[in-house]
Amino acid sequence: MAELSSTLIVRGENIQTLYNSYVNQAFVVNRRYQRKLVWAISEKAAFIDSLRKQLPVPLVLTAERTLNGTTTLEIIDGLQRLNSIFSFIENQYAIDGQYFDLETLAETKLRRDEGILVQQEPILDRRECVSIANYVLPMSTYRAPDEALVEEVFRRINSNGRYLSRQEIRQAGAISNFADLVRDVSSFVRGDISVRDLIQLTNMPSISITSDSTGPGVYIEDVFWVRNKILERDQVRESRDEEIVADLLATMILDSVPRYASDTLDEYYGLKPGDSKESRRDRIETAVQREGGELIRSRFEHVHNVLETILKKSGKSFSQLVFRSPRQRVPRYYATIFLALYTLLIRENRVVSDEWALIRVLDGIGDRVFNITAGGGTWSAENKRENIAAVAGVLRDLTVPAMGQRDVLLEANETRIHRLLRAALAEHSLFELKQGLHSLDANAEFDSRGFQRIMKALSAIANDGQEAVGYVIIGIADNKKDADRVKQLHGSTPVRDQDFWITGVDHEFGAHGSSLDGYMSFFGEKVRSSALDPDLLSQVLRDMRPANYHGKTVLLLTIRSAGHPVSYLDKWYERQGSSTIEVPTRDVGRLFKRFS
């Protein structure tokens, strides 16, 4: 690693100036190590009260980064404080029952006049608002030459564990396939998924874990772990869920069942140099590379989706279903059932034959079948293995062999679609939603112009950069007008989900042999005969997946960078927000720089 040398600038910035920078998208957050906006309203209000009283507050540390030719400030330390300031200014919460006066700042007044912000009442005295806006916040900006140094600074700042939990220390700056897999899968389960690592601070609230039930984002009580009473809120805040996921993934891919212990997790991340088991990190990296990260992730998602479906159908939380009375060490019971299902559904290639029968067997199973031993923070490999085998034995009769060799990569489950729609709220440029392939006029014929727009969107998303990954989902409308028209034409009632309407494409099957296979075959032929870049074309068709979402069929297209810019019909396209824009000839060089 390069030496930690750079230019460090320490200065004071008043909050009014910082807010202007925020609105102009100057601040970004690296979700490799900062994924949650976890301060409760009371904590935010207490911080604002310190500003109001002109009390000293800790310094905010940022790193100056250049992204696609634009200079940004990556927040290394101070995310919760900055979010508290900007969300208070935008009237998302009050202090002492009073809201910031939007007339105080020219920027907030303009945004109120444009309908972006709404003044809440009662209003805090203007003089106090001015005092808060003029508060000079201590700022330190680190000009780092590369991302690795930024992550090393973050790790060193928090290495004493006073601000970060042990798992957050493990993940901060961890560069390994296993660490990336844990990060991605954990985000999938929680629901705070994003496609990019670097997210503009303005978009963070839409996809972050939050303690505010009324605001945007994923309310912490709705997170799988908390909702099912597997973990407490504070444990999720401390990334205890990521420790569970890390252990599950390790058990899935290693040749033998590992014990669960803090030092074992440290070894997976290579945090114990000189230890006799230092090779554990190498073994788990080899296992990830052997199986393939995408396949491992898909297998995990498949088992999780089966378990979540069972819980939803039962009408109970995990703890309510598994136990007659509250128990300690609930995560170990969850891990056992998950890994028992993994054994049956993945390793033995079976499927659940009767969901209601499975629910009946799981009802109170924690009081009958399990023998989880005590042992503080350590769970022995032997006890873990015995419990997995016992539960798998009980559940095996409720499954049957799958017809043929099932490929979970071909299954886009309902949970993944839901998570992607949440990400679409913040990362508009990487998502395109289409209600279908047919027009919404009375004839309902194939919409060739709409198809061309899909092809342009595919090309534009692929042009986002070397690491670009984006999605087009067919069967979801992004406006109520189109959804209502589908209902009027076909009698299919759309389902509202967040800010989207699920129309499905089932009503379009009639023109294509009345089947999903015929529909996908038709779309595939259209794509193959298009002018789409050959590399991109092959990848999109290879990764195309159908999914059942809210009882309706949708089509998920995944777009990955081709490693070079792609054109469509001799023109270049890029995404600006949720729009696909043709790149002028004079700007094509800028597009190519993203891949250099």
Image (cartoon, rainbow, N blue to C red):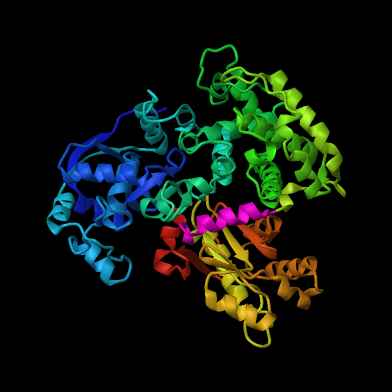
Q: Quadrant of the N terminus?
A: top left
Q: State the extent of the magenta-drawn residues as a range.
A: 412-428
Please tell me in which quadrant of the rendered image residue 59 appears.
top left
420 magenta-colored: yes
Give percent across and percent down for residue 107: 23, 62
Secondary structure mainly formed by the magenta segment: helix
In this view, the residue farthest toward the left is 127
Q: Is residue 356 visible?
A: yes
115 magenta-colored: no
| Residue closer to the observer: 197 or 457 | 197
Q: Is residue 99 above or below residue 552?
A: above
Residue pictured at 28% horizontal, 66% vertical? 111
Q: Is residue 474 above or below residue 8?
A: below
Task: State the count of labels.
Answer: 0
Give percent across and percent down for residue 167: 49, 29
In this view, the residue farthest toward the bottom is 442
Please tell me in which quadrant of the rendered image residue 265 appears.
top right
Give the side of residue 564 with respect to residue 382, left or right: left
Give percent across and percent down for residue 241: 55, 35
